[in-house]
Image: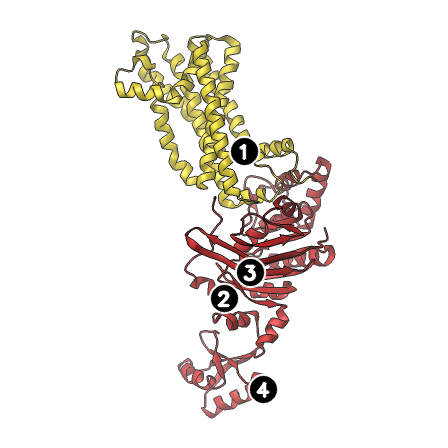
Chain colours: A red, B yellow
Amino acid sequence: MRDEHGIQAEALAREFKGGIRAVCGIDLAVAPGEIYGFLGPNGAGKSTTVHMLTTLLPPSAGTARVAGFDVTTEGQQVRAAIGAALQEAALDPLLTGREHLRLQTALHGMPRAERKRRSQALLERVGLTEAADRKVQTYSGGMKRRLDLALALAHEPSILFLDEPTTGLDPQSRNALWAEVARLARDEGVTVFLTTQYLEEADVLADRVGIIDHGTIVAEGTPASLKAEIGRPSVEAIPANPAELAAVAAVLEHFGKPVPGSPKGVMVRLDGGEEALADVVRALDAEELHVSHLQLHAPTLDDVFLTKTGRSLEGAGDELEEPEPEPVPA
Amino acid sequence: MTQHGPLLLQVSQLARRSVMRTFRRPINVFPSFFFPLMLLAVNVGGLQAASNLRGFPTDSYLDFALAFTFLQGALFATTNAGTDLARDIETGFLNRLALTPMRNAALLLGQLAGVVALALLQATLYLTVGIIAGVRPESGVLGVLLIVFLGVLVALAFGAIGAFLALRTGSGEAIQALFPLFFVFLFLSSMNLPRNLIEIDWFRAVTTINPVSYLIEGIRSLIITGWDLQALLLGFGLAIGIGSIALTAAGWALRGRLARS
């Protein structure tokens, strides 16, 4: 199960009918056993990239090798080496969890006894033993996602693709899934390629993060290095009297460029770093402005996104005119 | 583990799933049993007098009309097969299957297994009801088996058309929307009268070029004539021909749909 090759892509691109360029020539290098977080808003090109790397969609240009195999010419070998849980748990509501696993393991050619053993082991691992013989249509969102992960692991792949695996999950289910993904990479050496639009997920889980926007990777590195690159923290002030919002904003603008924050307050990135906080307090005091909340924010991946694209990641997808296209038949 | 996986195992597992999902949705299965029999009852009740026409091949309209129920049942099977496959595309389940070493042929054959199972039960039910109501197939026991076989073959051919349409459109709604069109095709056939007794020229011409007429007449010949080699050759030949073309087209559409390397 331990991966020895990882994922490499060079100038990987995909254009859809009508000239929509979903992915514009990206380079990727994911090391064996690494958890790589692919972060970006809706429509940025994350899922299209996953579809290309998993052989579901031929690239329009560029090359990619997954587990040492070319995704264009060695699709069978790639598929044998990878597991994937794509966006939206793709399950048959009329089948039970156990039936899903039996089907999946059979399609991978496992002998009957091994199918049974592997299915049971995976059900136990994802905590679905009790619900194993219930139809999937009775499962919660979290249970479906766990079954989805179990199916992706059915044939013990060395590389795992997870496309927005925690979207719509409650915090408990999300944490459980994070723990399992981390365990797979740590204990079994599985390489994980994880797409997400959640900053926290990328921050907590990924060894390295690639930030994609409009089909282009705009930043890449460890979460710590990316945040360190931004360097400067932000300060957020919420006036005690909402009528003084404009006055507070006028004061804070002397200390840095405004960035999105609470609608009740003002946030700026401090040009002078955290040492400028005392000056901010003094300036507000000099103007006799009272604040109910004053907080220093360390740089986040959203700040990285903002710096690189000029937009905040949260809500950035809403600004896109074109949704990320689904694969269509040739 | 093999890179391609054994075809027989893949077909059997996908067939198992297809049969299970077919019969776990009674609301979809029930109409395919009930409506053809209801239409049969209505037709026999209203058109019995047609059997008095000079040249009508039997004195029992029930004997004449029973064959049509098989075609109508096959049409329901087509819609079910198409809708099921379209749902797999819509939910991403097809992508899940595509990420396994599954062969394309296994998916199509497995998917059609549900159609075959349903068609087998339909044919048995229609024949049983017909026999209880007084139909006595002229071709005897062997003929009865052949009626069931041809009924299943027709359902398989129609099911392959449903699969092709599902793979091209990827939409369950599109399949449902095409259902009335198929139905018109069935009605523009020799379902209610023998072609030689249809007096309106354009209608007779349409029924003559409509392959559905020959599928019905193949089954009908076993009920009311006995062993009519020409009718059987046309019936079986067209069922096999339509099925082969539709399966080939569905295979082509599946390759395009999966687009995997």
| Point 59% across, 52% down: residue | A53
Mark 2 and 1 residues: CB-CB less than 8 Å, in contact?
Answer: no
- Residue at which label 1 appears: B108
Chain bearing tag 1 is B
In this rendering, do the residues under marks 4 and 3 share a single chain?
yes
Circle on res. A314? 2
Callout 1, which amino acid?
A: Leu
Say above or below: A56 vs A40: above
**Residue A209 x %, y %:** 60, 65
- Residue at which label 4 appears: A275
Quadrant of the rendered image containing residue B4? top right
- Residue at which label 3 appears: A26
| Point 48% across, 62% down: residue | A214
**Residue A261 x %, y %:** 48, 74
In this rendering, do the residues under marks 2 and 4 share a single chain?
yes
Indicate the secondary structure of the residue bearing disc 2: loop
Residue A321 placement, left or right of A38? left
In this rendering, do the residues under marks 2 and 1 share a single chain?
no
Instruction: Find the distance from the CA under tag 2 to the CA under tag 4.
Output: 28 Å
Instruction: Find the distance from the CA under tag 1 to the CA under tag 4.
Output: 68 Å
Chain bearing tag 3 is A
In this rendering, do the residues under marks 1 and 4 share a single chain?
no
